[in-house]
Structures are given as structure tokens and as C-alpha cells.
Image (tube, rainbow, N blue to C red):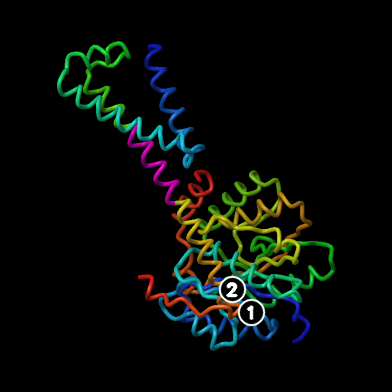
Amino acid sequence: MLENNDTVVVVPVFSEAPVIAQVIAELSQYFPHIYCIDDGSPDGSGEIAAKSGAHVVWHPMNFGQGAALQTGIEAGLENPDIKYFVTFDGDGQHSPIDAVEMVKTLRAREFDVVFGSRFLDERTELTAAKRVVLKLAVSYTNALTGLKLTDAHNGLRAFNRDVAKWINLQHNGMAHATEIVNQISKGNFRYCERPVHIVYTDYSKAKGQSLWNSVNILFDLILR
Amino acid sequence: MRIAQLFLMAVIFVLLWFALHHRSSTEARAFRRIAFLGLTVLIILAVIFPGTLTSIANTFGIGRGADLVIYLVAIGLLFFSVSTYLKFGDMDRRITLLSRHIALLESKGDIGRVDPDSLK
């Protein structure tokens, strides 16, 4: 239990009331420090997260996942004992075991950043359309950043304190996924990918991003 | 294509570039006001002297004076929407930075929580 006492799990939360208690319960079996950033949820997600034992940081309005992640990272940096950071989606699509494995990889000190990828094994089931869009997105991100990733738009990542200090997300919305990769590329950090299992429940599918949002993301990235 | 038409196209791209790169400078603000005044004067003149405007338009390879005004208005609209889009983006970023700072102070227990209802 205490083995991950030096790790903060950053969970951006926007209107996840039906599932957030369970997500935190599962995470807290492995991680004592869970920082939920309630991104102005109108449904009381933050209150539920606080009751479930997470440390909650409240955004007074909704700013988007990029802003929530940045707040969570900065809140984690306030604690000097924290060496590792994990970003973990609040809708229950990620597995805490994968996060544990990624932090283990970081502890070997061979890498500064571990990206989760749903394309490195066969566990994750995807619709054809989603697969195509994610593949296009990662091609774009790789071309932009020079990194070689198989899945750039995965919310499960782990990195050390140096990376946490370096990252400064400016894109509030979902364009932050590309932005994170870009900043890590500029910082010349050592990175790798680990296979992760994304569970697409009916809940996360209903809540998840519409493929149309990729148009908005592209626009945000180009024009600013 | 006439040289005058190429010139108009070039003006459009220079304006867009200007909108993107100097959006908050003093020059950009002055420029916006000059463009606004110029367009207003042009429209008034177009109403009073339709013939003159048409002959100006003709030198640019455009058939009618009214068409010239339409093109200029279209450029103005494009310019306006891009600069407004960017301005809102800037404002969003500033509000986010301020709010995130407040959120972190709350998280440390330095100040009380903002009541979200008070912001509605």
C-alpha cells in the first residue's frame, strides 16, 4: 500500500457522478494520493470524489481537461515528497493495474515518461471508425513532434517530477493530448509506451468524445 | 488575371497575417480603426457617387462598384471573425490561469472555496 506513497494520480473530473466513487475506490487500493480536479461539474462529482477519499481541487468553472490536468500537476508539485505523476481519466475506462505497472517502469529510472497505448496488444476493442481517427491523430502528433508513438490520445500516462515541472498546458480542451507529447518532445525526455487496456463501457461510450471533436481539436491546434 | 486582382488577393493575405501576429499591438488597434473608418467612408461615397465607384472598381478588374464594396466587406468580415476568435481564446486563457491559481490556493487551504453559483 505504502509503496506508491510518492505518487500522485491526477484525475480530471467533469460530470462523472455515476462512476467516480468506484474509480477512486479502485485506484485507492494502489495509490494513497489521488488528486481529483473537479472541472466545474454541475452534478456534484467533486463532492462524491471528496467523500470517496480523494483530495479534490475545485475549478470554479468548466475549463476543459487540459486545464484540469495542469491544475492537478501543479497541486501535486506542491508536495515535495511526490516523485511520480499519473494521469488517469475519471470515467473508469482505465485500469489501475496498468497505472501501477507504469509507475514501476518509471522507478527503474530508465524512462522519464511512460505513455499508455491501447494499440500494443489485443485487449482493447475499438470500432473501426474510432481506430481510424485515433490512428490519424497519432500520425499527426508524431509528424508534429518527431516522437514515435502508437497512441497519442490516451489519458493514461505516467511521468516523473522533472517532466511535471516542465509541462505547461495551454490548450484547455482536448488538444492538450498533442500538446503534452509536443512539450515532452521539446524537453528531450526519455519516453516509452506500455500496453494498457481501455474498457469501453456503455457509460464511457456515451460520455466519451464524439469523433466530430477531432475537427475542433485540429482547428484549435492550428489556429491560435 | 489582372495585376490589380493579384494586388487585392495579396491585401487579403497581408491582413490575415497581420490579424494573426499583431493582434494586441497598438498598431493593430489603430489599423482596425482606420480600416473601419475607411470602409464607412467608402460605403457613404458609394451611395452618393455610384458611377465613380464603378470606375475605381473597373481599374481593379471588377465589374461594378457594388461588387468592390462586397469584396471589401467580405475581407472585413473575415478579418473580424479571425481576430474575435483569437481574442476570445486569449481571454479564455487568462481566465483559466486566474481560476487555476485560485483553485490551487483553495487546495492549500489558504482561502475559502469559490461558490460556483455566484459565477452564474
Q: Is residue A126 left or right of residue B54?
A: right
Residue in the foreground of this view, choosing between A119 and A174: A174
For image coordinates 75% across by 74% down, the residue present is A80
Question: Looking at the rendering, in which quadrant would you find the N terminus of chain A?
Answer: bottom right
Q: In the image, is residue A21 above or below residue B52?
A: below
Q: Are marks 1 and 2 on the same chain?
A: yes
| Coordinates of residue A147 in the picture (x, y in percent) | 71, 49
Mark 1: few/some/many CA within 10 Å (<14, 14-19, 20+): many
The residue most toward the left is B48
The secondary structure that dominates the magenta segment is helix
Q: Position of residue B106 (x, y in %)?
A: 55, 76
Determine which of the numbered discs, if any, sits on residue B24 in the image.
none
* Quarter occupied by residue B7: top left
Q: Is residue A26 above or below residue A63?
A: below
Q: Is residue A121 left or right of residue B43?
A: right
Magenta segment includes B86: yes
Q: Amino acid at mark 1?
A: Ile
Asked whether B21 or A219 is in front, the reply is B21
- Is-magenta flag for residue A150? no
Taking the spot 70% from the left edge, 65% from the top edge, the residue there is: A195
At x 78% / y 82%, what residue is drawn?
A3
Q: Is residue A30 left or right of residue B55?
A: right
User: Which mark sits nearer the N-terminus, 1 or 2?
Assistant: 2
Magenta range is B75-88
Looking at the picture, which amino acid does disc 2 mark?
Val
Is residue A214 shown above or below A75? above
Q: CA distance from mark 1 to mark 2?
A: 7 Å
Residue that label 1 marks: A34
Residue A11's disc number: 2
Circle 1 marks a residue in which chain?
Answer: A
